[in-house]
Image (cartoon, coloured by chain):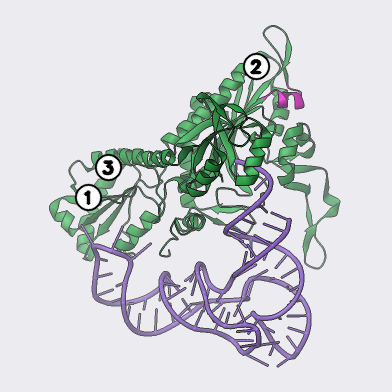
RNA sequence: CGGGAUGUAGCGUAGCCCGGUAUCGCGCCACAUUUGGGAUGUGGAGGCCGCAGGUUCGAAUCCUGCCAUCCCGACCA
């Protein structure tokens, strides 16, 4: 454990990298672009998984598992899909190694696969190939399946959690009898993601639709939630795709409707990944370390004893054990850290770095007065309170912290969201304060591309339920009926 | 994948220009004193100098190739 963290002002990007490794979330592995998610980081991911999984099941979905490998030929069946992923696929060509006689292990050329296997970058193709066998009638629909898996995309430039060559995610793949039902599903899952981001991660998000250029390869419509990080850059936190009949047509998945008519099945897919971990870190944390929302914190409360001698330590431990039991009874995860190998100040700093929402410190003084010192991570405020009713107090405090973190993130987003009406203003805001910029756009990919090339800002989304208003495109001056959200993004 | 930078003990580094087996701090181990915000003292351990070749009597240092990381581009969840 080393002292000090680069501050956000000094170098935001370095702050992020240091924080992820120093807080024990993840580290680089021996494999380029691939990370090791360490136990502390993984336990946060597990909390995310648990919350999301429950929400998926509450909306009628079941989990299943499909293969890691996809035959190459499957990819070419959906034209825009292959185009979108072809340049970043890991390909398995052989199934055996051998000893070359000089003590080196080499690929056995005799063990060449007849058809190469692609390590899945996403599973639409293998799943729709499977669904063909599952669906004959409208009675077989809908199919509401989710998969928790790892995928591989051979990214050129990687960053821990935000973009790794291999990442963990969930991908939902649903099949429906009607277009309306599929769109409804797409929107429902976007809503699940938004609710999760806001209620669990305490990250406010904009719900919107991607423009044609930013759409998922093979989708008719891509819905997304967009979050804003502290440095004013946007992060796509989750996507939900309406795939139309594209994959059903590519994999020949037809069903007989109630009316006896043969038709292609309607599809959706939706996913969030370990990238959410990056969002969580960048949205809330400060120069002292992580700030975790209580609902996702592996340890919600830590108790640090401060003692002189074994006798006092034993007395404090007795009281602490009672507090631990009381908190556990309320389903609050608590750690009593009575390690004698580290001093209190060290522990304080360590738990701040790791983002534990509430710290209770208890020493001889408290023992006499029947009090404890409570410190909250989000505001760093300390308070000495009576042990009487401590559990209720902590419970309420955790809720308050959850809410406060959200409010802070929301206030930051509001402060960093700007309406502009000219291209000059657009560029100026982008370079000075960043954030979301709400501006009129003529709706053409050409304009979007030109703005991206000139400013590095992309259209993050067209917000859902967007206010309709007449205006002129900031670049071309052509008429526009609504504003869209621009930002520089991760 | 293009441009730039970096790689020396667990971490951060000096040494490299000008070749002679490696400096310092933190951390680690032992003991003692300590414990209300990252303790102090004494003693100790720890190094394929990113990897592989080459030049040389001799390479952390010079040359070539490779690998990885960071930053900037293009690509992307």
**Circle 1 sits in a helix, a strand or a loop, which is it?**
strand
Neighbours of disc 1 within 10 Å: few (<14), some (14-19), many (20+): few
Give the residue at x 70% y 31%. A218
Q: Position of residue A134 (x, y in %)?
A: 69, 22
Residue under numbered circle 3: A394
Question: Which chain contains the residue that carries disc 1?
Answer: A
> Is A294 above or below relative to A63?
below
| Residue placed most toward the observer, A67 or A376 | A376
> Is A222 above or below relative to A436?
above
Q: How far apart, in angstroms, are the residues tagged by discs 3 and 1?
A: 12 Å
- Mark found first going from the N terminus, 1 or 2: 2
Give the residue at x 71% y 33%. A126
- Mark found first going from the N terminus, 3 or 1: 1
Q: Position of residue A184 (x, y in %)?
A: 56, 20
Residue under numbered circle 1: A383
Q: What is chain A's hue in the picture?
A: green
The residue segment tinted magenta is A244-253
Q: Quadrant of residue B47?
A: bottom right
Q: Select label 3 or label 1 by which is in front.
A: 1
**Circle 3 sits in a helix, a strand or a loop, which is it?**
helix
> Quick check: A17 left or right of B56?
left
Residue A294 on the magenta segment: no
Are discs 1 and 2 located on one and the same chain? yes
Residue under numbered circle 2: A177
């Amino acid at each position: 454990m080393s002292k000090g963290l680069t501050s956000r002002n000094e170098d935001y990007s370095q702050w992020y990298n240091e924080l992820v490794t120093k807080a024990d979330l993840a580290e680089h592995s021996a494999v380029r672009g691939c990370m090791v998610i360490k136990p502390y980081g993984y336990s946060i991911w597990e909390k995310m998984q648990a919350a999301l999984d429950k929400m998926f099941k509450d909306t009628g979905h079941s989990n299943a598992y499909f293969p890691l490998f996809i035959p190459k030929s499957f990819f070419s069946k959906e034209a825009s899909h292959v185009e979108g992923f072809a340049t970043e696929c890991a390909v398995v060509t052989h199934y055996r190694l051998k000893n070359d006689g000089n003590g080196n292990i080499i690929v056995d050329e005799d063990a060449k696969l007849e058809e190469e296997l692609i390590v899945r970058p996403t599973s639409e193709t293998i799943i729709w190939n499977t669904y063909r066998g599952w669906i004959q009638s409208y009675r077989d629909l809908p199919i509401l399946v989710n998969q928790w898996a790892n995928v591989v995309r051979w990214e050129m430039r990687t960053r821990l959690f935000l973009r790794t060559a291999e990442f963990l995610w969930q991908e939902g793949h649903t099949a429906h009898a009607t277009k309306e039902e599929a769109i409804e599903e797409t929107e429902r899952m976007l809503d699940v993601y938004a609710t999760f981001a806001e209620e669990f991660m305490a990250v406010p998000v904009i719900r919107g639709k991607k423009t044609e250029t930013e759409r998922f390869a093979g989708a008719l419509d891509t819905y997304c939630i967009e979050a804003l990080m502290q440095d004013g850059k946007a992060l796509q936190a989750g996507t939900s795709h309406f795939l139309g009949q594209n994959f059903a047509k590519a994999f020949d998945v037809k069903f007989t409707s109630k009316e006896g008519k043969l038709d292609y099945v309607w599809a959706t897919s939706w996913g969030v990944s370990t990238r959410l971990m990056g969002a969580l870190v960048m949205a809330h944390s400060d120069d002292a370390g992580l700030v975790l929302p209580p609902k996702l914190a592996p340890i919600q409360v830590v108790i640090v004893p401060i003692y002189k001698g074994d006798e006092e330590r034993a007395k404090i431990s007795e009281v602490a054990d009672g507090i631990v039991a009381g908190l556990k009874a309320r389903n609050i995860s608590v750690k009593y850290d009575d390690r004698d190998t580290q001093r209190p100040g060290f522990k304080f700093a360590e738990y701040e770095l790791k983002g534990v929402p509430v710290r209770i410190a208890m020493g001889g003084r408290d023992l006499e007065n029947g009090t404890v010192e409570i410190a909250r991570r989000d505001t760093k405020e300390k308070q000495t309170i009576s042990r009487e009713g401590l559990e209720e107090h902590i419970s309420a405090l955790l809720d308050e912290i959850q809410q406060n973190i959200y409010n802070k993130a929301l206030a930051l987003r509001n402060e960093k969201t700007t309406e502009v009406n000219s291209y000059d203003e657009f560029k100026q805001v982008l370079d000075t304060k960043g954030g979301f910029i709400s501006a009129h756009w003529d709706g053409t990919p050409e304009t979007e591309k030109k703005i991206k090339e000139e400013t590095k800002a992309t259209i993050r989304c067209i917000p859902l339920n967007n206010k309709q208003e007449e205006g002129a495109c900031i670049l071309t001056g052509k008429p526009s009926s609504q504003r869209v959200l621009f930002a520089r993004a991760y």
